[in-house]
Amino acid sequence: MTSSAPSLQVVVLAAGQGKRMYSSLPKVLHPLAGRPLLAHVIAAARLLSPRHLCVVVGHGAQAVRERVAAADVVWVGQERQLGTGHAVLQAMPHLEDEGTVLVLYGDVPLIGAETLRALVDAAGGDRLALLTQEIADPKGYGRIARDANGRVARIVEEKDATDAERAIREVNTGILAAPRRKLAAWLSALRNDNAQGEYYLTDVVAAAVAEGVAVEVRHPRAAHESLGVNSMAELASLERRFQMNQAARLLESGVTLADPSRIDVRGELACGRDVSIDVNCIFEGRVSLADGVHIGANCILRDSTVGAGTEIRPFTLVEGAVIGANARIGPYARIRPGTQLADDVHIGNFVEVKASTFGRGSKANHLAYVGDSSVGSAVNIGAGTITCNYDGANKHRTVIEDDVQIGSDVQLVAPVTVGKGATIAAGATIVKDVPPGGLTLTEAKQVTDPGWKRPRKK
Ligand code: UD1
Ligand code: CA
C-alpha cells in the first residue's frame, strides 16, 4: 500500500434513493460479491490512505451507517438531495482546510485505486482533475465541453445540453479531485438555475476555468471502473464483471476453472498450486484451498480452510470448518461451523457434521448426523447413525474415542462416551457410557412367526 499526499480527503456521495432499483433497501447497500456497494468504494478509497473519509448519506442513512459500520468513516447527513454540489458542500465542515478532496460515488463500486491515485496526482494540490471517458452512447451523462483550443471549458448536463453538446461523446464519470480551499469557494457560489433545479457539482469546472485554475483530465484504467448502479440490470451486469475479473485472476495464478463464467467469489479465495474448481461453486468470506484441492460442481464453501490434496465432491456445503489434507468430503455433505476434520477423513453423502472434531482417517460415509462430538482417529460411523445432542433445552457432547466401530442406525444419546476400540452393533440406542473394547448391543432379539398371515381387505 502506497500512501499518497498526506492531505488527501475523500468524500463519497451516497445520499440518493435509487428509485430505479424498486427496492426498499437503500441503493448503496445492495450487495456486489456479497458486500454492499458502498463497502467496495470505501475499500478503494482506503487504499489511498486518506486523512479523512466522509460519506454523505440521506435516504436510509441509519441503515447505511449500521450496515457499513467503519471506525474511519465520518458520516455526514444530507436530508434533502438538492444536487451533487450540495452533497459535497455538506461534507466541507468535516474536512481539513488544506489538501486535495477526491469525490467518489457510493454506487460506482468497481473504481480502482490506481485510477484514483493517477487522478489525485493530476490534481497536484492546485489543479482540478476530472475523470472522463469517451463512450459510444453518452446518453444521460454530463458532457465535457471544450473550447476552440480543445481545453476543458465546462461540463454540461444532458438535460441542459444543446443538440451539438449532446453529440459530444466524452462524458463526466462524476469522479473528480480538487484543491480543498478552492472547492469550498466554488461550491458556496453554486446556483441551481438549471433544468433540474439542482446544485450541480459539475459547475465547479466552469468556475475553475473562470479563475484560471488548470483543469486536468484523466481516464479510468479499465472502462468498467466508472460504471454506476441505477437498476437491478446494472447491478447484475457489474456483478458478472466483478466475478469475471476474479476468475481471470484465479486463472492467472494457475487455478483450473472448469468455466470462468460459473464461479462466484464473495470474499477472499486463496488457492495453492494445482487447485481445480468445477462449475457453479460459490466461495464466501475467507476461504483457503491448499495445493491440489479439487472442488466438485455445485459446492458452497464459506469461511473455511481445506488442506492439501483434499477433494470436496459435488453438492457439498462447508461452513466455518477446518478440513485437513487428503480428505474426501461429499457428495452431498454438509459441514457446519466449528467443525475440524483431520487428514484422511471421509465424510460421505447426506452426512451432516456440526461443531465436531474428527481425528485422522475417521469416516462417516453415509446418512449420519454428528453434532457437538469429539471423534477420535480411525473411527468408522455407520449409515443412519446419529448423535442425539439436544434434549430440547441443552446441547450435550458425545465423545467417541479412537478406533471405535459404530454400526448402522445407532443413536448415541448425549452426553455419552464410547471407549477406545469399542464396537457398537447396528440399531443400538446408547444411553450410557460404553467401555473400551468389546461389543455393545441393545437391539431386541429377532424372532419369526412362521404361521403369520397378512391381513386381508374385508
Ligand atoms: C452525475 C453528474 C454527471 C455525470 C454522472 C455520472 C452532476 C450534476 N452530474 O449525474 O455529469 O455524468 O453523474 O454518473 O453531478 N447524490 C447525493 N446527493 C444529491 C444528489 C446526488 O448524494 O443531492 C448522489 C447520488 O446518490 C448518486 C450520485 O450522487 O450516487 C450522482 O447523482 P445523480 O443524481 O445520479 O447524478 P447524475 O444525474 O447521474
Ligand atoms: Ca447517476
Image (cartoon, rainbow, N blue to C red):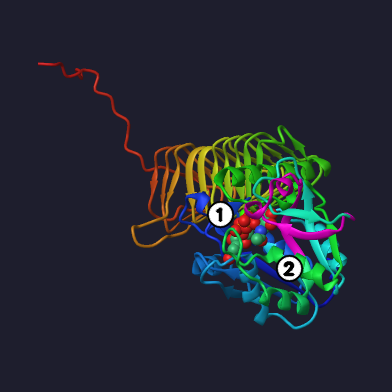
Residue lying at 77% horizontally and 77% vertically, measured from the top left: 182
**What residue do we see at 13% from left, 16% from top?**
457
Horizontal side, residue 388 vs residue 139: left or right: left
Depth check, front residue: 129 or 225:
129
Magenta segment: 149-176
The response on whether ligand 1 sits within 8 Å of label 2 is: no
- Comparing 435 with 67, the one in front is 67
Taking 276 as reference, is 235 left or right? left
Q: Which mark is residue 204?
A: 2
Q: Is residue 46 left or right of residue 76?
A: right
- Position of 410 relative to 145 (above/below): above
- Between disc 2 and disc 1, the foreground one is 2
Q: Amino acid at mark 1?
A: His
Q: Earlier in the sequence, mark 2 or mark 1?
A: 1
The answer to whether the residues at label 2 and label 1 have Cβ atoms under 8 Å apart is no
Relative vertical location of residue 320 with respect to residue 349 in this rendering, above or below: below
Q: Which residue is mark 1?
A: 30
Q: x and y percent of residue 400 in the render?
A: 53, 52
Say if the magenta span includes residue 159: yes
Q: Quadrant of residue 197?
A: bottom right
Looking at the picture, does residue 425 appear above or below residue 225?
A: above
Q: Dot 2, how many residues are within 10 Å of its Cα: few (below 14), some (14-19), or many (20+)? A: many
